[in-house]
Amino acid sequence: MENNDNIDATLNHLFRQESGKMVAVLIKIFGTENIEIAEDVVQDALVSALETWKFRGMPDNPKAWLYRVARNRAIDIIRRKKHSKTIDFSDPKKQLLTSEYTLKTTMEDFWEENQVQDDFLGMMYSCCHPDISQENQITFILKVLCGFSTKEVAKSFLTSEDTISKRLYRTKEYFRKHKIRPEIPSQSAINQRTSSVLSAIYLMFNEGYNSTHTNQLIRKDLIRQAILLCQSLLSSEQTQLPEVYALMALMCFHSARLDSRVTAEGSIILLSAQDRSKWDHELIHSGQDYLNKASFGSTLTTYHLEAAIAYQHCCAECYENTNWNKILEYYNVLLNIADDPIVFLNKCLVILELQGPKEALLALEGIKKNKLLEKYYLYHATLGEIHLRLSNHSLSLAHYDKAIRLTQSKSEKRFLKDKISSYK
Amino acid sequence: MKEFMFLFKGGDEVWDSKSPEEQQKHMQHWQQWIDEMAQQEKFVGGERLYPHGNTIHTGSMKVIDRPLTESKELVGGYLVVKADTLDEATQMAKGCPGLLWESHVEVREIWPED
């Protein structure tokens, strides 16, 4: 008999990897108006795997087992519902599901490997439809394509299950009302549509990467899923775009430093103090590969530049060796592409490194009274640091205080409080 | 367009004599044939029948626990299709893979609803 923990671990892993693909195929079969049926089939397959494997041991090919159960379950449901109005069989291919002469072979066709991958990507594009808010996009992707439970999604967003259920409901309604059909967009629309898919993936990644979360497991899970989604875009020729490689590179560079960013107790370690031997050099290497592949064509996106900046940090042997000039150059180009106050704030931090606090403060004057930044803790933390270096202790204290009030993260609050207490 | 029914008769012995792999392959041919009709929006529906069943006699209402036809006349299933004429429907029926496995096809027009 198998070790039950082993079964749980395998199933968990399989579920995160495969449930999204299974759901995507099932949504294609049952239609976007029946997303619940698709989710139920996959859930049933999981439960039956758990029960069966605990008694009979794990099958030789757990993935194939799971897919087979889902397929058979789908056949059962079609046999039961083929005369009801729930499922729309008017499409010629789906019509073949209604006769026993063709049901099984047609069902097999739906699960053909290339087909599965395309359906998964198609579903990803549908989830990132520009009419759906980004918050709802990610909620939906995590739940439907990444195998997260409502509870896990709620944890990822630091919000209630109730809120998540409402978001999911709204998105499902949107799919239903507009009869969205999951498909990879045509060549003419692919660039634009990919950009919203990428920003959803990047947001998901950041949700995991930023230290707003105390729950390490959820954080790593989010990062892994974001990378997995990006990888699936790269596995299909239609969606192998330069910006996809660039985002992948960026995520590799960031993840490589993940474990050195916090202490075992969850306190933040600044870049300058991080143990660089803890960085994952294999990931940095993959990141370089992706960045090289990102440089075909004429597209230069914010992902390219952010990846280039992250790479500069990764390849510096120590903090003092960081090529700040190169980084400043990248920031200037980046600001030309996207005039983003937060990017500007980051540029000011580079100026602080290169030219000192006076110049940095001068640069920051340029974005004073920006409403977004006023509410951004890092803006105040930066000002706190600058004034500290200029020995304006009372001003520094005021900004640090504000930063502490603005951040939700316990570890960031602690970090800032430690900072203050060191000179108070 | 009119509707026609294809009645597939006989061939059960051949089916039973084949391996599961051969049967599966055979069903793929059925799928290709029906898919072609579906693509042209000429496929309406259809089902397969098990060979066993009961027959109820007229008058006495006596029940016999088997179909009354001989095996080569036994209906194994049906499809409903759309076609303009009996000739067209007959042409369509000629593609039936069952014909290769000793079942024959009867093409009949369905009574119009009104």
Image: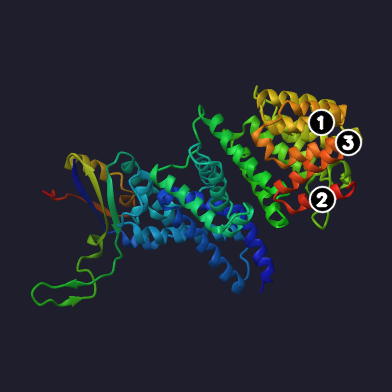
Which part of the image, by quadrant, shows the N terminus of chain A? bottom right
Residue at image position (73%, 25%) is: A366
Query: Closer to the camera: disc 1 or disc 3?
Result: 3
Q: Which residue is pictured at 71% across the width and 57% down the height?
A: A215
| Alpha carbons under labels 1 and 2: distance apart | 23 Å
Residue at 60% over, 41% down: A200
Q: CA separation, marks 1 and 3?
A: 15 Å
Label 1 neighbour load within 10 Å: few <14, some 14-19, many 20+: some
Q: Which amino acid does the dot numbered 1 rest on?
A: Val
A185 to the left or right of A286: left
Q: Are marks 2 and 3 in contact (CB under 8 Å)?
A: no
For disc 3, the marked residue is: A389
Q: How many marks?
A: 3
Which residue position holds label 1?
A: A350
- The residue wearing badge 2 is A417
Chain letter for mark 1, please: A
- In this view, the residue in front, A365 or B90, is A365
Q: Are marks 1 and 2 in contact (CB under 8 Å)?
A: no
Q: Are marks 1 and 3 on the same chain?
A: yes
Which sits in the foreground, A364 or A197?
Answer: A364
